[in-house]
Image (cartoon, rainbow, N blue to C red):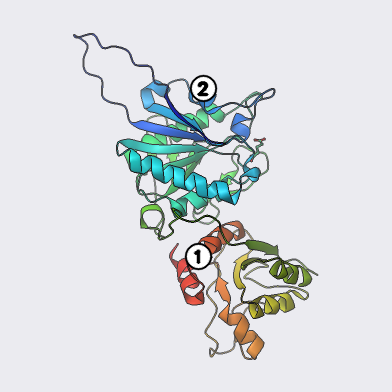
Amino acid sequence: MRVRVIVFVAVFVAAASSAPAQPTLPRVHLVATGGTISNRDGGRLTAEDLAKSMPGLDRAATLTYEQFANVASSQITLEQWLQLARRVNELFANDRDLSGIVVTSGTDTLEETAFFLHLTIHDPRPVVVVGSMRNPSTLGYEGAANLLEGVRVAASPAARGKGALVVLNDEVNSARDVTKTDALRLQTFRSPTHGVLGIVDRDRVVFFREILQRHTAKSEFDVARLTALPRVDVVMVYQGATGDVIKALVDLGAKGLVIAGAGAGATSGTQNEGLDYAAEKGVFIVTATRTGAGRIAPPQRPQAGAGGQGQGAPNGPATTPAQQRRRAFSISAEDHIPVKARILLMLALAMTSNRDEIQRIFSEY
Ligand code: GLU
């Protein structure tokens, strides 16, 4: 359900003719999708409730808002990702004077929605995803504070060209790098390898670094005419994990698989048999790491010399026909965590079935 009514909430005070001219406030649009930030006992907060919840908003921005959904983030569907990306692109395209957009989300899978927007929004203006860890009925609810900080970031010229951003707990993280690291703590959103992009301080939003990989305005992914995303599943590696699950996923129609590999990508048990089966059926296999951080290098060319990183690692020499076939369908996730590698693989597969092209995409984004 999406309510497209756009409502202005800033309070305009008619200026007396003698009053000094007020500087025009930046305009920010809020798209609410639900999550803990809205999950009040006895009835969820709407976009309007959220927009009216921020003391001091009238000094930061003029805010318009709309309700896109009002659900837990884990309930957001792939169709909704596509609709949301199209809606955000449309909002930017139709309003050249808009400074930025804030999207509220539940925190559990917030990083997935945020990364999808990072790859599919074609505008340098900031898209800021905001949530909260405590719900509005809890003492210490931090939703209004996070939201106001998100609005300030969306209104900040410094946030332009930095891709989709995640703002909670006074910190700005890139949608590319951030992940939820704690089930309950307020300081849960972290970018484990690269760190925060910036902070939201009392006086201003301060950025310390930016993302060099492609995103938003430089992204090649066009969701304008995409009606569905190819099925991609994530498979976890653990001791004794078997390959029959992988075969089942292939038979269920997966077009791609992301392996949340042990260490630098090792598999276990009979998982290699499952992966050989996947390659036989033309299913692409992206190797990521289950460790939560670190880069998996692209596989060596088939003729490359000995090496590799242990049993089942994706980087060793490919000598048998089965290994060569597997290699022809194997891609490295670079430093993307498995759930984000899944998103990138879905978007890549919507465009191409060429292995080298898919690896290029992983290396560029
Ligand atoms: N923490 C949940 C989420 O990630 C929110 C729960 C709810 O909105 O009902 O979406």
Kindly give the residue lying farthest to the left in the view shown.
18
Q: Amino acid at mark 2?
A: Ser
Front residue of 205/364: it is: 364
* Residue 9 left/right relative to 310: left
* Residue 152 left/right relative to 342: left
Say which residue label 1 marks.
348
Task: Work out whether 253 lies above or below 340.
Answer: below
Q: Is residue 290 visible?
A: no
Q: Quadrant of the C terminus?
A: bottom left
* Residue 78 left/right relative to 165: right
- Pair 2/1: label in front: 1
* Residue 180 left/right relative to 176: right
Number of marks in the rendered image = 2
Q: Quadrant of the N terminus?
A: top right
Q: Can you tell me which quadrant of the image ligand 1 is in?
A: top right
Q: Quadrant of residue 185?
A: top right
Say which residue label 2 marks.
53
Q: Amino acid at mark 1?
A: Ala
Mark 2 Cβ and ligand 1 under 8 Å apart: no
Task: Work out whether 246 lies above or below 48.
Answer: below
Task: Work out whether 67 lies above or below 318.
Answer: above
| Residues at discs 2 and 1 in contact (Cβ within 8 Å) | no
Task: Work out whether 73 lies above or below 285.
Answer: above
| Residue 216 location (% of width, % of height) | 40, 53
- At 78% from the left and 68% from the top, the residue drawn is 241
- Secondary element under disc 1, as helix, strand or loop, is helix
- Secondary element under disc 2, as helix, strand or loop, is loop
| Residue 317 location (% of width, % of height) | 60, 86
Q: Is residue 266 visible?
A: yes
